[in-house]
Image: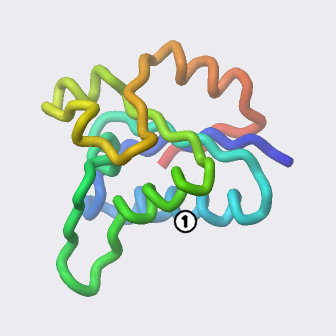
Amino acid sequence: MTTFTLIIYDAPMAKERALSALRFAWTADLEGHKVKIWLFENGVYLAKKNQKPPQGLINYGQMLEDLVKNGVEVKACVVCAEARGVVSTELIDGVKLATIHELIDWTANSDKTITF
């Protein structure tokens, strides 16, 4: 079993990078790997509750919520969130705000770190 830390920089709907990251996380989790997701910069918007994308578009928030329910640990950069006016009560249940020190710990203890 491999431990992956995924670092996501992009907001939902901005580009397909966030979707690629979530698809990677979902597949790795299904294959039995340990997955951790760190939301950086605009990536913190992925964790906002109650996302309502237009009909026919993917609901990134629901994908992230499903990953959390499956045991994937998700943390969002507290400095990035505060800079964007995002507070912990607006985040999907199970997503925690964290400091860069926690990201350093994750990457130091992961087999692979991948950025999106």
> How many badges with numbers are in the image?
1
Residue sticking out furthest to the right: 1
10 Å neighbourhood of mark 1: few (<14), some, or many (≥20)? some
Which picture quadrant has residue 8? top left
Residue sticking out furthest to the top: 101
Q: Amino acid at mark 1?
A: Arg
Q: Secondary structure at mark 1?
A: helix
- Residue appearing at x 62%, y 39% in the figure: 5
Residue sticking out furthest to the bottom: 56
**How was this image coloured?**
rainbow
Residue 57: x and y in percent read 29, 79
Residue at the spot of label 1:
23
- Asked if 35 appears above or below 110 in the picture, the reply is below
Q: Is residue 101 left or right of residue 82?
A: right
Q: Is residue 115 left or right of residue 85?
A: right
Residue placed most toward the observer, 95 or 38: 95
Residue 89: x and y in percent read 24, 36
Residue 38: x and y in percent read 48, 37
- Asked if 50 appears above or below 35 in the picture, the reply is below
- Residue appearing at x 57%, y 40% in the figure: 73
Residue placed most toward the observer, 26 or 6: 26
Residue placed most toward the observer, 12 or 86: 86
Residue 9: x and y in percent read 38, 43
Q: Is residue 37 left or right of residue 11?
A: right
- Residue appearing at x 77%, y 52% in the figure: 33
